[in-house]
């Protein structure tokens, strides 16, 4: 597979009144053509800052890229000016934001907002752009597109506004689509429709997708690979099957265990990860997750763990994978959730530890 994006040792910080916040700390990952990568983690883990940095959307100052490279189609985006990035944003890389009502212009008809993208990035005549806007609304599943192209955002439901946002993001046929928690403000039924729509559009247009979410439940049906972020770092990376059925980092265990139960067991409890993420104005020594990790070793408080390789596609940043570490299996609450997921998604895999 051909690499579309390479993020190497990315570090991003923000100057605040309380000091320098080190929001992204040495993040590295690749994205291949036609692939969907999900980035998951609690709020404040660095997911959105990482992806907004790819598009150079973080305000500079107070934000600053202090280290690393972002190679898009082999070209480094880090040194590019805002003027140079204008030719890439929207045309090569597009973004779907969390709340479409704040992203759409309430004073402009949705058709005109799509036409603006087509005119800027495709140099399309207005008459052709108008027809293409209707085609895009139809493509994303909006009924009566000939009529609705002349309506304002407030005349659409939340789910339909999100579809309009997807149509705008796809207008210039981007190679990379970044979806920043695009279903958070929607109810469960509409969430499922939007996720299914994105899968269908990706297959049709062969667009690569970075999908940001704090909800592991939406990942299983949309992603090829998953990056788990904590305290500005990627702590585990693997295929969907590896993350869901053979997780190795205690933080990933905690995220899985905290998912709502998928059965009707009234006695089933919702687990929570104890404690809070660290203050990134002064990142802790050693493993940032140590104080919340019941399996933490003495070395976790002294030295940051490297990224251990489990397979060709699976990596985890935990000292528990060191050859001399004690052999600790995921807790029963995590294995139970993995079995439930296996039954729900009908994946014929055996949960590791049940052999």
Image (cartoon, rainbow, N blue to C red):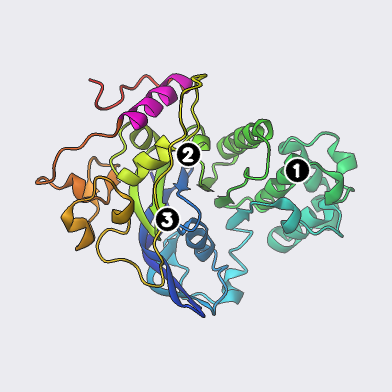
Q: Contact (CB < 8 A) between labels 3 and 2?
A: no
Residue 282 in which image quadrant:
bottom left
Q: Is residue 339 magenta?
A: yes
Query: What residue is pinned by disc 3?
Result: 276
> Mark on residue 216?
2
Label 2's element?
helix
> Mark on residue 158?
1
Q: Counting residues from the N terminus, which is met first, the one under dot 3 or under dot 2?
A: 2
Q: Which residues are magenta?
A: 332-344
Q: Is residue 120 left or right of residue 296?
A: right
Asked if residue 117 is positioned above or below residue 313 in the image, the reply reads: below
Q: Position of residue 132 (x, y in %)?
A: 78, 46
The residue at 68%/40% (across/down) is 186
Query: CA–CA distance between discs 3 and 1?
Result: 32 Å
Q: Position of residue 260 (x, y in %)?
A: 50, 32
* Label 1 CA crowd tier, 10 Å (few <14, some 14–19, many 20+): some
The residue at 55%/45% (across/down) is 207
> Mark on residue 171?
none
Q: Look at the image and tell me whether residue 119 can be seen.
A: yes
Query: CA–CA distance between discs 3 and 2?
Result: 19 Å
* Number of dots carrying numbers: 3
Viewer-closest of 315 and 146: 315
């Amino acid at each position: 597979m051909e690499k579309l994006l390479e993020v190497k040792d990315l570090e991003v910080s923000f100057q605040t009144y309380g000091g320098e916040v080190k929001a992204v700390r040495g993040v590295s990952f690749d994205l291949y053509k036609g692939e969907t990568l999900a980035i998951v983690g609690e709020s404040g883990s660095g997911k959105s800052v990482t992806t907004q940095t790819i598009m150079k959307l973080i305000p500079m100052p107070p934000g600053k890229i202090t280290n690393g490279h972002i190679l898009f189609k082999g070209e480094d985006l880090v040194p590019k000016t805002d003027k140079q990035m204008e030719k890439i944003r929207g045309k090569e890389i597009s973004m779907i934001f969390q709340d479409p009502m704040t992203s759409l212009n309430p004073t402009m008809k949705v058709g005109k907002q799509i036409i603006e993208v087509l005119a800027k990035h495709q140099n399309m005549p207005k008459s052709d752009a108008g027809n293409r806007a209707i085609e895009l609304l139809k493509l994303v599943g909006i009924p009566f597109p000939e009529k609705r192209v002349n309506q304002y955002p407030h005349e659409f439901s939340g789910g339909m506004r999100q579809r309009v946002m997807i149509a705008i993001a796809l207008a210039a046929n981007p190679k990379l689509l970044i979806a920043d928690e695009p279903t958070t403000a929607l109810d469960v039924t509409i969430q499922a429709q939007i996720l299914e729509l994105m899968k269908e559009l990706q297959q049709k247009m062969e667009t690569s997708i970075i999908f940001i979410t704090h909800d592991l439940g939406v990942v299983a049906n949309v992603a090829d690979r998953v990056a788990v972020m904590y305290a500005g770092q990627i702590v585990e990376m693997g295929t969907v099957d590896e993350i869901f059925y053979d997780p190795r980092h205690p933080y990933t265990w905690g995220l899985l265990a905290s998912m709502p139960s998928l059965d009707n067991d009234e006695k089933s409890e919702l687990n929570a990860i104890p404690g809070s993420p660290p203050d990134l104005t002064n990142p802790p020594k050693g493993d940032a997750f140590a104080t919340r990790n019941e399996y933490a070793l003495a070395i976790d408080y002294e030295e940051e763990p490297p990224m251990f390789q489990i397979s060709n596609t699976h990596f985890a940043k935990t000292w528990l994978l060191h050859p001399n570490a004690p052999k600790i299996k995921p807790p029963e609450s995590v294995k139970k959730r993995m079995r439930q997921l296996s039954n729900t998604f009908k994946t014929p895999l055996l949960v590791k530890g049940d052999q």
